[in-house]
Image (spheres, grey):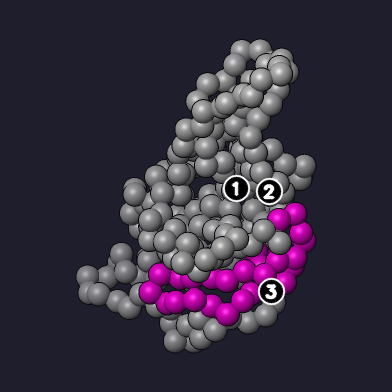
Amino acid sequence: MRILITAGPTREFFDTIRFISNPSSGKMGYALAAAAVERGHRVTLVSGPVSLDPPEGVRLRRVVSAAEMAAAARAAFARADAAIFTAAVCDYRPERRLRRKLRKQAHTLTVRLVPTEDIAASLGRIKGPRVTIGFAMEDHNPRRHAADKLERKRCDAIILNGPENVGSDRATVEVLVAGWGWSRPWRGTKKQLAYRIIELAECLHAVAAARSASCRTIGTGPAPGRRHSYRQGRNA
């Protein structure tokens, strides 16, 4: 498969120096890229600013802002069979970016923020037979918000993540697959989880390919031997 993976944070500047961002390390996205290459896939990695070396064999596109990430992801998506959106894209950006550094003043400063493009949702609207997997970073009502994202972004699966996983080499996630339900928690190193997520993408792609090639309606779940694995989960 040709797989698009987005990773890391974005930075949204309000002057030449200062910006809004988040603490995403990019470790999960880079682990996914490495796992996909090892399994023989062709990978385009669209990465925000991180301190990681890219895995060998990936096609790397470095970006900074949400707008840059959206443009690079859209270009790669046109040639992709699947996309995994792990990037922690800023939901808002300053309405204006000043041309020079804003000097500190005694009075209160108000910065007007406007929404950035929802990359997964935008590409979900034009996905066709492609498989898309999103990530949901939630700190309250996690399953409800993740399920909402699955539907709103038209993803085939959502990986429910938590703030405790940010920057860590290990993680605990839950997986919601459209038509299959929730998995039990998946626990392990991010490398171990990356292999399982790539395997899930392969399974979803096989189902989508079979559906596209057939004139009859087929089930939305995996083959019987695989369904138990993804719905019930196995600790990595």
What residue would you read off at disc 3? 187
Q: What element carries label 1?
A: loop
Q: Is mark 2 on a helix, strand or loop?
A: loop
As drawn, 222 above or below 31: below
Q: Which residue is drawn at 53% across and 52% down?
A: 85
Q: Which residue is drawn at 56% across and 63% down?
A: 140
Q: Which of 75 and 142 is in front in this view?
A: 142
Verify CB contact (< 8 Å) between mark 3 and mark 1: no
Q: How many numbered marks appear?
A: 3
Verify CB contact (< 8 Å) between mark 2 and mark 3: no
Q: Which of 44 and 231 is in front in this view?
A: 231
Task: Name the side, left or right, on which 99 lies relative to 105.
Answer: left
Q: Counting other residues with Cα less than 10 Å from the Cα at mark 3, is it few (<14), some (14-19), or many (20 or more)?
A: some
Verify CB contact (< 8 Å) between mark 2 and mark 1: yes
Residue type indicated by callout 3? Arg
Q: Where is residue 187 in the image (x, y as percent from the top left)?
A: 69, 74
Q: Which of 171 and 28 is in front in this view?
A: 171
Q: Position of residue 144 (x, y in %)?
A: 46, 67
Who comes first in sequence, dot 3 or dot 1?
1
- Magenta part of the protein: which range? 166-195
Residue type indicated by callout 2? Ser
- What is the number of the mark on residue 177? none
- Residue 171 seen from this side: yes
Q: Counting other residues with Cα less than 10 Å from the Cα at mark 2, is it few (<14), some (14-19), or many (20 or more)?
A: many
